[in-house]
Image (cartoon, grey):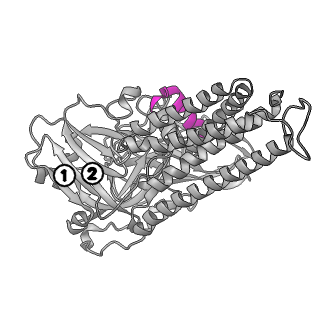
């Protein structure tokens, strides 16, 4: 006669068995080059989350939102595994069913991901089988066998249980480590491809001249370095890219569908343009904005080659990971420098920013235009909706005229001469003037940096004779169409935040 495994040890058994199931799934996914179960479930969570929850995640966690999601999923799995272990000590079939259920959820999520087939279910299924078998063994009551067979109902062998638990934990750690190493090698192999220099085929007139006068203060570079450029997307892991087989298709309502390889794009006439990109989730004064020199092929040239049909309304693009967005066909032909970009700040596109190719459309928020890891462009009607539109965001996303105070960057400054400085943007319209208001005084014109492009932000600066006390600084910009940014505050949803950026400063 034996007694069940004690509750606290059953909980530990569930935790390590669940951990092994997850890491085995990760390992099999890495080896077979399919989506990881954790990433598959996480992507489904992202896709099915309400708009308010996405806004909360970006607002609270910023670019660490995906890390927070992974931690949340792992925490939920850990809690569930503890519960499964406790249940399995009384009824082992419940433990098997519990781990099997999580395996089924992972398998269904994986096969549902764009670009994945039935084979994507294998990692979750194998992980669940191994985890269930280990849990059954660990929660099976066995009499003590050492130092000799027990003649009394003493329950279970704690020493053997702890030894087994330790071995399983080590196995899970090793499996997870190997999986991460394999995934790391996959990503590194793609990164190595991005380090190949782009051919020097630009005409001098197609490369922008950025004069020294573009920067009137030092704290915010006019050109944002690649490593500092913001990244907001729905991808939990980078899509697999084989540059030799990659291509982008242009089809739908066109006369001549096109299929362009990476080599084809490199061989086409290319340009470089300075364009500021901004995320619709950028709060007033936020940091989800960056300015870069983008290199690529003009979108209008490719669409003219394909022959856009008269009833086409939308340029609808798809990423390698299945993300979609769309913008009006007119935005490709109204004179703005919309492009398929393959370079960023003199280098091939970094993997984080869309390698091998992405769309860059000045004047439109990224959620309707800036498809990274580009795979397809379809000319269609508005019947098709991009990823964010059915989730409550506007179908049209023109960037609003905005400005931001970057200096002073601390809440306390010394009395005397101080600079108030920042950036202003109104892509495709350009910035005409920037004004600063100190407390309840008059609006004062700021000095503007050089006007490099209507599609790029402009730096601005105002010299201030700071007097002791607490002061409120405000800024507003006026674009070249004569529109001054509104003082009315609005949230980021559904089509971008508005209002004046205000900073409180204590002068001592």
Q: Is residue 91 left or right of residue 118?
A: right
Query: Is 231 included in the stretch rendered in magenta?
Result: no
Q: Residues within 10 Å of mark 2 (few under 14, many from 20)?
A: many
The answer to which of 197 and 448 lies nearer the viewer is 197
Question: Residue 285 location, x and y as percent?
Answer: 54, 42
**N-terminal-most mark, 2 or 1:** 1
Question: Residue 29 location, x and y as percent?
Answer: 49, 50
Question: The magenta stretch spans which residues?
Answer: 47-61
Q: Quadrant of the N terminus?
A: top right
Residues at discs 2 and 1 in contact (Cβ within 8 Å): yes
Q: Do we see residue 92 in this rendering?
A: yes
Q: In this view, does 150 lie to the left or right of 347?
A: right
In the image, which disc is placed on residue 345? none
Q: How crowded is mark 1: few (under 14 residues within 10 Å), some or many (20 or more)?
A: many
Question: Residue 232 location, x and y as percent?
Answer: 48, 45
Quadrant of the rendered image containing residue 79: top right
Q: Which residue is located at x 41 percent, y 27 percent?
A: 391
Q: In this view, does 170 lie above or below 81?
A: below
Q: In this view, does 147 lie to the left or right of 55?
A: right
Number of numbered labels in the structure image? 2
Q: Element at badge 1?
A: helix
For mark 2, what is the residue?
Answer: 338
Q: Which residue is located at x 37 percent, y 48 percent?
A: 432
The answer to which of 457 and 254 lies nearer the viewer is 254
């Amino acid at each position: 006669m034996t007694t069940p495994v004690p509750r606290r040890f059953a909980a530990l058994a569930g935790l390590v068995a669940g951990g092994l199931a997850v890491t085995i799934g990760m390992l099999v996914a890495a080896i077979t080059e399919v989506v990881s179960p954790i990433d598959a479930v996480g992507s489904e969570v992202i896709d099915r989350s309400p708009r308010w929850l996405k806004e909360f995640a970006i607002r609270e966690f910023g670019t660490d939102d995906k890390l927070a999601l992974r931690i949340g999923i792992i925490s939920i799995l850990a809690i569930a595994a503890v519960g499964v272990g406790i249940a399995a000590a009384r009824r082992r079939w419940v433990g098997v069913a519990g781990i099997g259920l999580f395996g089924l959820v992972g398998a269904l999520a994986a096969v549902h991901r764009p670009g994945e087939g039935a084979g994507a279910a294998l990692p979750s299924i194998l992980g669940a089988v191994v985890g269930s078998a280990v849990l059954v063994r660990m929660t099976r009551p066995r009499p003590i066998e050492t130092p000799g067979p027990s003649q009394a109902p003493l329950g279970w062998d704690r020493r053997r249980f702890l030894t087994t638990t330790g071995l399983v934990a080590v196995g899970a750690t090793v499996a997870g480590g190997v999986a991460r190493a394999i995934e790391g090698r996959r990503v590194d192999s793609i990164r190595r491809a991005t380090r190949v220099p782009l051919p020097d085929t630009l005409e001098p007139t197609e490369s922008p001249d950025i004069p020294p006068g573009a920067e009137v203060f030092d704290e915010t570079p006019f050109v944002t370095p690649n490593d500092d450029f913001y990244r907001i997307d729905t991808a939990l892991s980078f899509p697999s890219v084989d540059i030799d087989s990659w291509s982008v298709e242009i089809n739908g309502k066109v006369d001549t569908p096109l299929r362009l390889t990476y080599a084809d794009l490199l061989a086409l006439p290319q340009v470089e343009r300075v364009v500021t990109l901004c995320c619709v989730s950028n709060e007033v004064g936020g940091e989800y904005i960056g300015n870069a020199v983008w290199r690529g092929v003009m979108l209008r040239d490719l669409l003219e080659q394909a022959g856009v049909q008269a009833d086409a309304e939308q340029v609808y693009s798809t990423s390698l990971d299945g993300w979609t967005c769309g913008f009006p066909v007119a935005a490709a032909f109204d004179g703005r420098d919309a492009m398929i970009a393959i370079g960023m700040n003199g280098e091939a596109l970094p993997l984080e920013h869309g390698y091998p190719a992405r769309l860059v459309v000045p004047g439109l928020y990224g959620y309707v235009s800036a498809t990274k890891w580009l795979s397809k462009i379809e000319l269609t009607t508005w019947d098709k909706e991009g990823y964010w539109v059915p989730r409550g965001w506007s179908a049209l996303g023109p960037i609003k005229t905005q400005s931001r105070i970057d200096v002073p960057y601390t809440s306390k400054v010394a009395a005397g001469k101080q600079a108030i400085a920042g950036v202003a943007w109104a892509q495709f319209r350009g910035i005409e003037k920037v004004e600063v208001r100190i407390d309840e005084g008059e609006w004062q014109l700021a000095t503007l940096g050089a006007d490099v492009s209507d599609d790029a932000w402009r730096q601005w600066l105002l010299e201030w004779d700071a007097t002791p006390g607490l002061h409120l600084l405000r800024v507003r910009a006026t674009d070249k169409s004569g529109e001054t940014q509104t003082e009315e505050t609005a949230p980021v949803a559904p089509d971008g935040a508005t209002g004046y950026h205000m900073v409180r400063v204590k002068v001592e």
